[in-house]
């Protein structure tokens, strides 16, 4: 296995035999779609799968805990994140699958903003 070396050549950084020119620019979202999802004590779809999704934000506009699951059928024991009342979450990885949610008790809503 060859040793990895790094050298600077202007705006070009070379690692071993692989060169990377310039900078990586992430895709910019052109549309923000906001959806209000009524709270429920049974699992509901917060956002359907969308391969065009570039980002997503959720605001728990409720006095109850919201359990969010990246995937299907959220529950108090099967969730990705737990959102306290009035919590805000911004997705930091690009996940394009379905997102479900369930509240500890049904009152209020989730405001879901999808960026495409």
Image: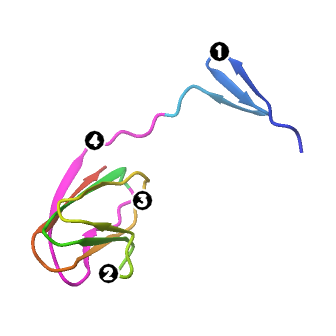
Determine whether the residue tagged by mark 2 lies in a helix, strand or loop. Answer: loop
**Of callouts 3 and 4, the N-terminal one:** 4
- Residue 20 location (% of width, % of height): 65, 30
Give the farthest residue toward the bottom.
Answer: 42
Circle 2 residue: 76
Determine whether the residue tagged by mark 4 lies in a helix, strand or loop. Answer: loop
Q: Distance between the residues labelled 2 and 4?
A: 35 Å
Circle 1 residue: 10
CB within 8 Å, label 2 to label 4 = no
Q: How far apart are marks 2 and 1 (CA)?
A: 53 Å
Give the farthest residue toward the left.
Answer: 107
Give the farthest residue toward the top.
Answer: 10
Q: How far apart are marks 3 and 4 (CA)?
A: 18 Å
- Which residue occupies 40% across, 51% down? 92
Q: Nearer the viewer, mark 2 or mark 4?
A: 2
**Of callouts 2 and 4, the N-terminal one:** 4
- Which residue occupies 13% across, 79% down? 106
Which numbered tag is attached to residue 30? 4
Circle 3 residue: 95
Q: Nearer the viewer, mark 2 or mark 3?
A: 2
Magenta-colored span:
25-51
CB within 8 Å, label 3 to label 4 = no
Relative to 99, 110 lies left or right = left
């Amino acid at each position: 296995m060859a040793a990895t070396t790094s050298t600077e050549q202007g705006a070009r950084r070379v690692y071993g035999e692989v060169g990377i020119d310039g900078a990586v620019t992430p895709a910019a979202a052109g549309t923000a779609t906001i959806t209000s999802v009524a709270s429920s004590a049974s699992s509901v779809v917060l956002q359907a799968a969308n391969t065009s999704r570039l980002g997503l934000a959720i605001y728990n506009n409720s006095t109850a805990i919201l359990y969010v699951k990246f995937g299907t059928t959220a529950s108090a024991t099967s969730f990705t994140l737990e959102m306290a009342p009035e919590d805000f979450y911004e997705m930091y990885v690009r996940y394009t699958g379905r997102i479900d949610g369930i509240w500890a008790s049904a009152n209020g809503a989730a405001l879901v903003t999808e960026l495409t």
